[in-house]
Image: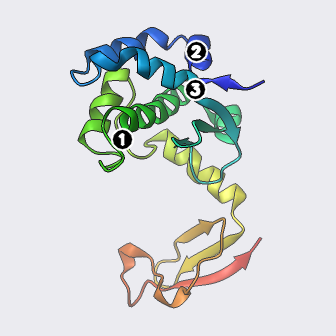
């Protein structure tokens, strides 16, 4: 069964929060009905992405959520926050334009209005769990020559000669590809 954004908002009791948030935006009030129609066009899919919690594909009218994170590790508030984050992207593209920054001022206004953290990446416990997922799924492990810090990657880095561990610097923080899982 395919879910639309509005179906999920209803199931997760977020409809009123999103509607009130849209109504509070001065540039969105005249397009309220069109915005709700747009959200009804969007489908929600689960993905097994290795490095992201969610994604909004405006052209295809799809919002993807990371199934691995939300079924094994996620809390309801994390799922809701990520879902609202992606909805904010869809509404931002609808209300503002294609050319504005994807996490810029207008996006942050929309995100705060509909009730999600207006941040670009996961933070706190979210980022720790994402690191655990990244470590568990990594096919390539790189180690800093200077401090021994391990960097886990799903894909092999190209041109390793120009890659280094930022805190250790370009000269002494070169990475060594030391393990393939």
Q: Earlier in the sequence, mark 3 or mark 1?
A: 3
Left/right of residue 11 with respect to residue 31 in the rendered view: right
Snapshot colouring:
rainbow
Rendered view: 164 above or below 59: below
Which residue has dot 1 on it? 119
What SS does tag 3 mark? helix
User: Mark 3–mark 1 contact, CB under 8 Å?
Assistant: no
Which residue has dot 3 on it? 41
Distance CA(mark 2)–CA(mark 1): 21 Å
* Residue at the farthest left position: 26
> How dense is the environment of label 1, judged by Cα within 10 Å: few (below 14), some, or many (20 and up)?
few
Q: Give how far across and how far down residue 158 sits, in percent.
A: 58, 82
Q: Which residue is drawn at 50% across and 40% down?
A: 125
Examine the image and state in which quarter residue 24 appears: top left
Q: Give how far across and how far down residue 130 sits, in percent.
A: 57, 48
Viewer-side label of 2, 3: 3
Which corner quadrant holds the C terminus? bottom right
Q: Give how far across and how far down residue 180 sits, in percent.
A: 74, 76
Q: Earlier in the sequence, mark 2 or mark 3?
A: 2
Q: Give how far across and how far down residue 110 sits, in percent.
A: 32, 29
Could you say which disc has been placed on residue 3 in the image?
A: none
What SS does tag 2 mark? loop
Which residue has dot 2 on it? 12
Q: Residue at x 65, y 73 (%)?
A: 141
Q: Which of marks 2 and 1 is nearer the N terminus?
A: 2
Distance CA(mark 3)–CA(mark 1): 25 Å
């Amino acid at each position: 069964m395919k879910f639309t954004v509005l179906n999920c908002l209803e199931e997760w009791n977020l409809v009123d929060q999103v509607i009130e948030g849209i109504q509070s935006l001065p540039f969105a009030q005249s397009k309220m009905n069109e915005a709700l129609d747009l959200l009804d066009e969007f489908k929600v899919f689960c993905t097994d992405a290795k490095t992201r919690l969610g994604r909004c594909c405006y052209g295809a009218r799809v919002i993807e959520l990371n199934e691995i994170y939300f079924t094994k590790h996620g809390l309801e508030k994390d799922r809701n926050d990520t879902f609202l984050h992606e909805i904010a992207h869809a509404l931002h593209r609808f209300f503002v334009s294609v050319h504005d920054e994807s996490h810029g001022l207008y996006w942050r206004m929309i995100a705060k209005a509909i009730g999600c953290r207006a941040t670009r990446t996961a933070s706190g416990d979210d980022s720790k769990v994402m690191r655990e997922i990244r470590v568990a799924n990594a096919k390539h492990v790189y180690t800093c020559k200077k401090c021994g810090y391990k960097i886990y990657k799903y894909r092999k880095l190209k041109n390793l000669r120009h890659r280094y561990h930022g805190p250790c610097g370009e000269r002494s923080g070169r990475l060594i590809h030391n393990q393939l899982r």
